Amino acid sequence: MSKTIFEKIIDKEIPSDIIYEDDLLIAIKDINPVAPVHLLIIPKKVIPTLNDLSKEDSIIVGKMVSLAKDLAKKLDIDKTGYRTVFNCNDHGGQTVYHIHLHLIGGRKMNWPPG
Ligand code: 5GP
């Protein structure tokens, strides 16, 4: 299977604005931000959609959410608030088939989403 854009970013084959990186995760600025803060928290393990999560992947997902919390504080949007989103498949609006958590903030969000 050919690499997704996020695998290419993880492998440093294409550039991105990296905010955080460790053995398991990378956090980058979204190329097309929908708010003043818009980061993508991406596991290095290739998992196409939330439907493909295994039980063992719970650790990765937990770390993704925990990193979102830490980055929200670092970027000073923790008090005002923020939104975290996993899009899954077509109806969820997923366009890159390598799971990622959006961290969006710096403005008031609407609900329900469009
Ligand atoms: P999805 O729609 O799959 O939930 O989100 C994919 C996100 O990846 C979109 O918000 C899109 O702007 C972002 N994106 C797509 N290609 C690139 C890229 O090459 N670099 C970065 N930094 N973000 C990208």
Image (spheres, rainbow, N blue to C red):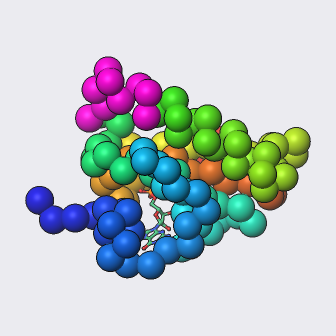
Counting from the top left corner in percent of width and height, residue 56 is at: 32, 24
Q: Is 100 in the magenta?
A: no
Is 97 or 43 nearer to us in this picture?
43
Residue range highlighted in magenta = 52-60
Question: Which residue is at 31% across, 62% downward?
Answer: 7
Is 54 or 80 nearer to us in this picture?
54
Say above or below: 95 vs 71.
below
Question: Which residue is at 33% across, 66% downward?
Answer: 11
Question: Which residue is at 32% across, 21% downward?
Answer: 55
**Which residue, as the protein is rendered here, is positioned at the far top?**
55
Is 38 or 63 nearer to us in this picture?
63
Predominant SS of the magenta segment = helix
Question: Which residue is at 63% across, 50% downward?
Answer: 103
The N terminus lies in quadrant: bottom left
Counting from the top left corner in percent of width and height, residue 73 is at: 79, 46
Lateral position of residue 34 relative to residue 93, left or right: right
Is 25 or 31 nearer to us in this picture?
25
